[in-house]
Amino acid sequence: MTQIGFIGLGMMGTPMAHLLHAAGHELVVQDARPEVAALFTDAHPGARIAGTTADYAACDVLITMLPNSDIVDAVVGPLASQLKRGAVVVEMSSADPNRTRALAEHLAESGITLIDAPVSGGVKKAVAGTLAIMVGGDIPAFERVRPVLETMGKAITHVGPVGAGHALKALNNYVSAAALIATAEAIHVGEAFGIDPATIVDVIQASTGRNNTTENKAHQFMLNGTFNSGFSLALQAKDVGIAASLGRAMGLPMALAQDVYAMTAQASESLGAGADHTELYRFVGRS
Ligand code: NAD
């Protein structure tokens, strides 16, 4: 059993923390929405809401599952003086790799190791404990927390130094977003030509254009109009923006990534804060 701090009980964080509790770990949780944290502790005997600095002082591992680097920095930065020396911070949000490196350096001054361990697979795999986890950072620290990560994920890969997990996660989400937009465009154009949308998806899925959208999103969340995958358009636009910035910083302009970012950001602004990323399908259809 490990004493774990868990910050960010949203669409992903709640099922991930649930699995940690089910595996017998002692949990101290925190969320900006007090009612969400209270709901979690009510349903998970022994789990406590972080109230005092002593709560984190006892934690061996602190996991964060927060929206973005601004929030991660604001929440984790001040904890440098509260966490014990030797603690490992596992930053599982999708965040900016350069800012992750800066935060890791800041924590290292207090003897705390940060590894980044963003996830892929969405709410469905978070619930099942089968997320893909890509890890950047110190290998001994990774090995120490590996059993904790194995509670939440299946394909767990160390991909490089600290920040590398976040870099790869952003690049993955860029590829995924590009495929989603291409699929949405193909469905709308095919439909305008008189082909049934379900047939379009099934034939692409059986052909060389198959991708995660044809397999797991088009029928499930788009064609049926439910648009409730659990991954927001705003978070997707953030991820593609990180990938596009990374390309510029590496001297590779990534022309397609700039376009995908412009489209996801524009759609997010137009559809509003609550929009699911699968709503890009209807945005593409009307633009
Ligand atoms: P979410 O918006 O559902 O959850 C974020 C949680 O963080 C919320 O409960 C919110 O109240 C809390 N929060 C915000 N500011 C806070 C603060 N200052 N202090 C404490 N808590 C705070 O988001 P999510 O979908 O669970 O995604 C979390 C992270 O995982 C994001 O970085 C996202 O890009 C990434 N991600 C999401 C999915 C998905 O399918 N939803 C998949 C993979 C990765």
Image (tube, rainbow, N blue to C red):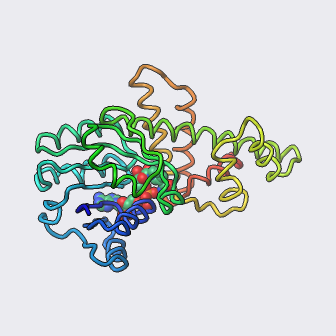
Q: Compare residues 263 and 77 and report the one nearer the observer.
A: 77
The answer to whether residue 270 is left or right of residue 27 is right
Please give the count of numbered marks on the rendered protein: 0
Q: Residue furthest right?
A: 194
Q: Compare residues 76 and 205 and report the one nearer the observer.
A: 205
The residue depicted at 44 percent of the width and 53 percent of the height is 153
> Dividing the image into 4 quarters, which one contains the C terminus?
top right
In the displayed structure, 214 sits above or below 41; it is above
Q: Position of residue 2 (x, y in %)?
A: 25, 61
Q: Compare residues 238 and 198 and report the one nearer the observer.
A: 198
> Dividing the image into 4 quarters, which one contains the N terminus?
bottom left
Locate ligand 1 by image quadrant.
bottom left
The answer to whether residue 243 is left or right of residue 78 is right
The residue depicted at 38 percent of the width and 37 percent of the height is 158
Q: Position of residue 16 (x, y in %)?
A: 40, 61
The residue depicted at 37 percent of the width and 34 percent of the height is 164
Q: Residue furthest top?
A: 251
Q: Quadrant of residue 104?
A: top left
Q: Position of residue 77 (x, y in %)?
A: 19, 49
